[in-house]
Amino acid sequence: MSEARAGHEAGRPENAAAFDANLAFLARWSAPLGLLARAMLAYIFIVEGVGKIGHYADVAGYMAAHGVDQRLLPLVILTELGGGLLVLAGFKTRWAAIALFGFCLLTALFFHMDADQTIQFQKNVAMAGGFLTLAIYGPGGWSADGLLKRGG
């Protein structure tokens, strides 16, 4: 009896070997998926950092209206744009992820505590969790950190 036929008779579908119940493919694809994940996390910070440069006065006013010293705006831009680019490249990734983890939590607390900001608050907490995970596990093989680790 063929293996496929035996598997079917045992109550397993014929393509049981093709079904990856343990998601082992993630390990095989971890390097490119890590790059994709970093790009997805970094995207909003790169866009927002550039946007803050273009709308500097407006952003400074928004910060002041929320009780945040507008002199911190250059640091905000550096954190968002610089941190986002570092995460995207996978260079000094754990440090950048820790900085963006803190940034997300502070942004949630300073700007998204009102009742009409619930989704924004939750989004920032979720992104902070993503950055904490990145800080713990690192950037993966397709990264500048990974290349430097391999000595390339």
Image (cartoon, rainbow, N blue to C red):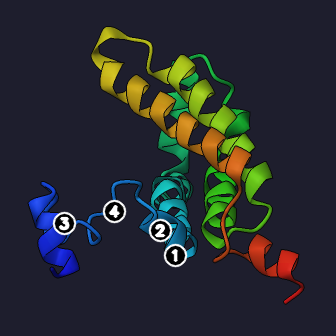
Q: CA distance from mark 1 to mark 4?
A: 19 Å
Upstream in the sequence, badge 3 or badge 1?
Answer: 3
In this picture, residue 57 sits left or right of residue 2: right
Q: CA distance from mark 3 to mark 1?
A: 33 Å
Secondary structure at numbered mark 1: helix
Secondary structure at numbered mark 3: helix
Secondary structure at numbered mark 4: loop
Secondary structure at numbered mark 2: helix
In this picture, residue 146 sits left or right of residue 85: right
Residue 105 in the image: state x and y as whole percent: 59, 27
Q: Nearer the viewer, mark 3 or mark 1?
A: 3
Badge number at residue 36:
2
Circle 3 crowding by C-alpha within 10 Å: few under 14, some 14–19, many from 20: some
Q: Which residue is mark 4?
A: 20
Query: Residue furthest toward the bottom?
Result: 152
Badge number at residue 7:
3
Badge number at residue 32:
1
- Residue nearest the viewer, comparing 136 with 66: 136
The vertical placement of 144 against 50, above or below, is below
Q: CA distance from mark 2 to mark 3?
A: 36 Å
Upstream in the sequence, badge 2 or badge 3?
Answer: 3
